[in-house]
Amino acid sequence: MRFGINTLDDLDVKDKTVLCRIDINQPVDQKTGTLKDTTRIEACIPTLKELTGKGAKLVLLAHQGSDIEYKNFYTTEPHATVLSKLLGKEVRFIDDVCGPAARAAVRALKGGEILLLDNVRFVAEEQTLFETKLLLSHEEQAKTLLVRKLAPLADLYVCDAFAAAHRDQPSLCGFEQILPSAMGRLFEEEFCVISGIMEKPERPCVFVLGGAKINDAFLMMNTVLSGGIADRVLTGGLVGEVLLWADDKDIGEGARSFIKKEGYEGLVGTAKALLAAYRDRVLMPEDFAAVREGRRAEYPLGAIPAGALVLDIGTGTAARYQAEIRRAKTVFVNGPMGVFEEEATEQGTRMVWDALGDTAAYTVIGGGDSITATKKYGKTKDIDYICTGGGALIRFLTGEELPVVKALRHGSKISPRR
Ligand code: ADP
Ligand code: MG
């Protein structure tokens, strides 16, 4: 038991039917029916090996894409092929989620065997539309078709889908109302790493917040500053720009119109409130870079020319941030310092990531683009923890209780049938 949730150490799975929800949602090439990336599938292998090694009859539940990104909404059949290869044993697939064919396949399983069911989001109640338009309580989720049909065939429920822990859906929150539950090893690692930072970070604890998701960044700032978790917040990207705007600094007409166009002007007020309360712990850029005639041009704050659109922090700011990162004992990063995808505006991000690579601090990175930057700068091995669950991680750091965490705590109190 960790943080109120059972781990795999707390369950006896031998010859038990275990429903295991994993997050193996990956970009698919629908023309060839293959996956373009398998990172998430690789990440859940330790849990699956442990469960089958201990003799579980393992039933895997997973989603692929959704109605809002229809080009990725697809069967989980290709995932079974990848899983089989990675596990070195057959993972059976059935093109049914909880109908008679799926249930017969579940009943036929023997200890140590694995079955992957089809995309759980093919079932209407699991759909994202359902989640946004009609929010079901966890008790109600236990009455949905998926849970009603599958729970009676199972002894235990394991969730290893931390990347989906912010989703309030039957395959994630319904089974814990009925079955004794636990988190898998990947979930345990991701959840305990970030819970550890939030409860007792080694100090100085530095948060580096950049990128374009300003609202999320401000919510995170508020949580970690008001809770006394962050000793320093280093800001970059659009997050830094909006803070400076709120501080009546001139970030240039280009940046202001961009922020207005993206609909973030309303966040200037939020930024003012953050600065009023926590100014002493928030660091903002003191210089910037823009592109002039195809090249990088740097300007100190207060001297940004009218026509320039700033797209990166300047090297002076980046050097100051490097020193903070090298002095820290814990560093959490979400969001790049600028448009690091372009050569002229990548230097701020590159310099900050260099410091992340060589600091002695415990380093944690989350967010799709931040992970891309980590790979681009060859720092993957140097970062202590790279969190696969971007959305869930951010939701957690904004201080919300994750629905799946709540459900797992409930399911951890149910005793197994003898
Ligand atoms: P993550 O995916 O790591 O959570 P975000 O999605 O919030 O990060 O932000 C990454 C995106 O923000 C990148 O596409 C990057 O080009 C863009 N970006 C960063 N800084 C700026 C800036 N100053 N102006 C415009 N876009 C920016
Ligand atoms: Mg992103």
Image (cartoon, rainbow, N blue to C red):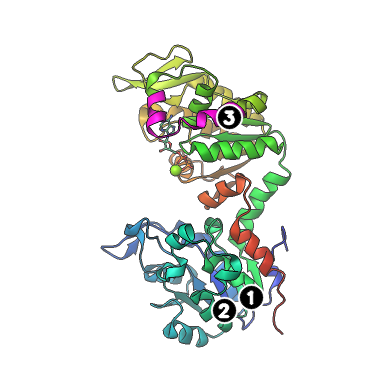
| Chain part drawn in magenta | 256-273
Residue at image coords 50%, 72%? 60
Displayed quadrant of residue 233: top right
Above or below — where is 141 with respect to 240?
below
Residue at image coords 72%, 85%? 418
Q: Are the two marked residues, 3 and 1, in contact with CB atoms closer than 8 angstroms?
A: no
Residue wearing tag 2:
151
Return the x and y of residue 44 as percentages of the image width and height: 53, 63
User: Could you say which disc has been placed on residue 179 in the image?
Assistant: 1
**Dot 1: what SS?**
loop
Of the image marks 3 and 1, the number of the one nearer the N terminus: 1
Residue at image coords 64%, 40%? 223
Locate the N terminus by quadrant. bottom right
Q: 223 or 362, which is in the foreground?
A: 223
As shown in the figure, which amino acid type bears the numbered disc 2? Ala
Return the x and y of residue 11 as percentages of the image width and height: 68, 73
Residue wearing tag 3:
234
Establish whether ligand 1 lies closer than 8 Å to the Cβ of label 3.
Answer: no
Distance between mark 2 and mark 3 Cα atoms: 47 Å
- Between disc 3 and disc 1, the foreground one is 1
As shown in the figure, which amino acid type bears the numbered disc 1? Leu
Q: How many marks?
A: 3
As shown in the figure, which amino acid type bears the numbered disc 3? Leu
Q: Are the two marked residues, 2 and 1, in contact with CB atoms closer than 8 angstroms?
A: yes
Q: Residue furthest toward the front?
A: 134
Return the x and y of residue 50 as percentages of the image width and height: 60, 70
Above or below — where is 170 with respect to 390?
below
Q: Is residue 278 visible?
A: yes
Distance between mark 3 and mark 1 Cα atoms: 44 Å
